[in-house]
Image (cartoon, rainbow, N blue to C red):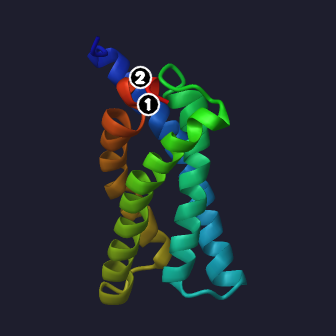
Amino acid sequence: MRPSHLDNFARWLRFNLVGGIGIALQLALLFLLKSVFHLSYLAATGLAVEATVVHNFLWHVRYTWADRVQPLWRNSLPCLLRFNLTNGAVSIGGNLVLMKMMVTFGHMNYLAANGIAIALCSVVNFLVSDEYVFDEGASATQ
């Protein structure tokens, strides 16, 4: 049975709450890795995004899509793999390409550019998560 528009909107709000916490984590890690550990902004971006992808997955399993998945690690590993290959690829690839364009070519502040990149990738990530990663059919086969 397909969820109602109200169910989809509630899930979108939960997704954005988790994402908001993830944004704070990602920006803090990006700042720390670039400013304190002196990594290049692209290396720092990749590491910060991957840490945030794992953080967000854990919250999505327990909160955003808790009605669709079993939070047992044995059952969650295929889901984590799907999440990392989809959301991770969109987030890391999208962030790196957009950061390169906005920072190197547009001379934008790296933190502001990262905020824009996150926002642009989030819609794609929600749709992929809802329709593929946490799809009830995929979760039932785990």
Question: Residue 40 appears at what percent x and percent y?
Answer: 55, 87
Q: Which mark is residue 32?
A: none
Query: Does residue 90 sit above or below 62 in this rendering?
Result: below
Name the residue type under label 2: Ala
Q: Residues within 10 Å of mark 1 (few under 14, many from 20)?
A: few
Residue 122: image x %, image y %? 37, 50
Tag 1 near tag 2, CB within 8 Å: yes
Q: Secondary structure at mark 2?
A: helix
Please say if 107 is above or below 136: below
Which residue occupies the foreground of this view, 110 or 133?
133
Image spot of residue 17 (x, y percent): 52, 37
Q: Residue at x 36, y 59 (%)?
A: 90
Give the residue type at disc 1: Leu
Count of numbered tags: 2
Image quadrant of residue 132?
A: top left
Q: Which residue is mark 1?
A: 13
Give how far apart the Cα atoms at labels 1 and 2 are: 5 Å
At label 2, counting other C-alpha atoms closer than 10 Å, the crowd grade (few under 14, some 14-19, many 20 or more) is few
Q: Position of residue 6 (x, y in %)?
A: 33, 16
Left or right, 17 with respect to 33, comes to left
42 and 83: which is toward the camera = 83
Q: Name the residue that disc number 2 marks.
A: 10
125, above or below 52, in the image: above
Helix or strand or loop: what does disc 1 sit on? helix
Q: Residue at x 61, y 41 (%)?
A: 58
- Taking the view exactly as shown, the residue that stands out farthest to the top is 1
Picture quarter with the N terminus: top left
Q: Residue at x 27, y 18 (%)?
A: 5
